[in-house]
Image (cartoon, grey):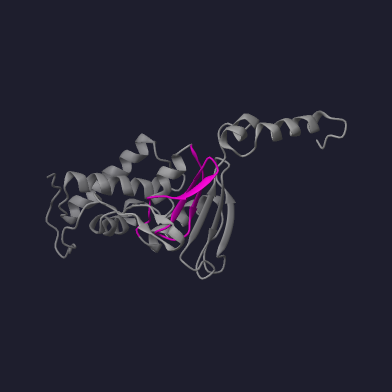
Amino acid sequence: MVVWQTQLPNVRLAPPMPLKAEVREEKPREGGYTIPGKVHTSPKIAQLRKQFRPKLLATHDEADTWERGDAEKEQLIISRLKTVIQKAGIQLSAKEIEELTDGLLNDLMGFGAIEPLVRNKAVSEVMVTGANMIFAEQKGKLAESEYVFDDEDHVQWTAQRIIRPLGRTFDRNNPMVDGRLPDGSRVHLVMPPSALKGTTMTIRKFPAKPLDVDDLIRFGSITKDVAQFLEHRRFGRYGFW
């Protein structure tokens, strides 16, 4: 076990809890739909993650334009995290440190729980319909993913981090917001009570390489016959282009 520990009075922690080692089993929903196994942050780490998020930033928007993969900025966050843990006298195993560090880097420099989906080039759209329901679209097919947010506060933290750099306000007076991310992706956010099951987010990504006819045929979006018909219409006498 790796231990970071110093003595600090009046620090109370929850007792050790299971790590994010288990994936909850798939469960059937109405109509025969099966919920995929979910990977949850362990309660202990989720608690620390929520507690430390604001403490690792000089200002609430300091890291809004930072991105995962920036080694210098990541090291800055990690250094601050070590200091906070040492001052609080918290004991963590190597696996707990890894889980906490990765989660905080995603929260402060990325897209929180959906960071892996946003960075996955094969994913064209990410939909969050509540803390426990995150969908991803790949090759035109939408499926529920194994990822989840810790709670509604975690979803809200991510939503605010996304929208602040765009100069938009997302609150009860402005519960629905549309915007465009720096990479061109479109984002749509809805806050309760307009969203009934918690804050919702939709990120429609744009591929680095635009889809062509061959891609559409390969994905099953159109057939070769339809592609040939459209091509003839395009260059025909009465073409609609």
Work out whether residue 173 can be spotted: yes
Q: Which residues are magenta?
A: 122-150
- Report the residue at 17% width, 54% height from top: 90
Q: Quadrant of residue 10?
A: bottom left
> Where residue 220 sits in the image (x, y, percent)?
59, 37
Instruction: Pick the residue in front: 224 or 183.
Output: 224
Tally of numbered discs = 0
> Where residue 205 sits in the image (x, y, percent)?
55, 43
Q: Residue furthest bottom?
A: 193
> Viewed as shown, does residue 239 lie left or right of 166?
right
Work out whether residue 210 can be spotted: no
- Report the residue at 75% width, 34% height from top: 230
Please check the rendered image and state whether residue 147 is part of the magenta-colored stretch, yes or no: yes
Quadrant occupied by the C terminus: top right
> Where residue 16 sits in the image (x, y, percent)?
16, 58
Instruction: Pick the residue in front: 170 or 145.
Output: 145
> Where residue 174 sits in the image (x, y, percent)?
57, 65
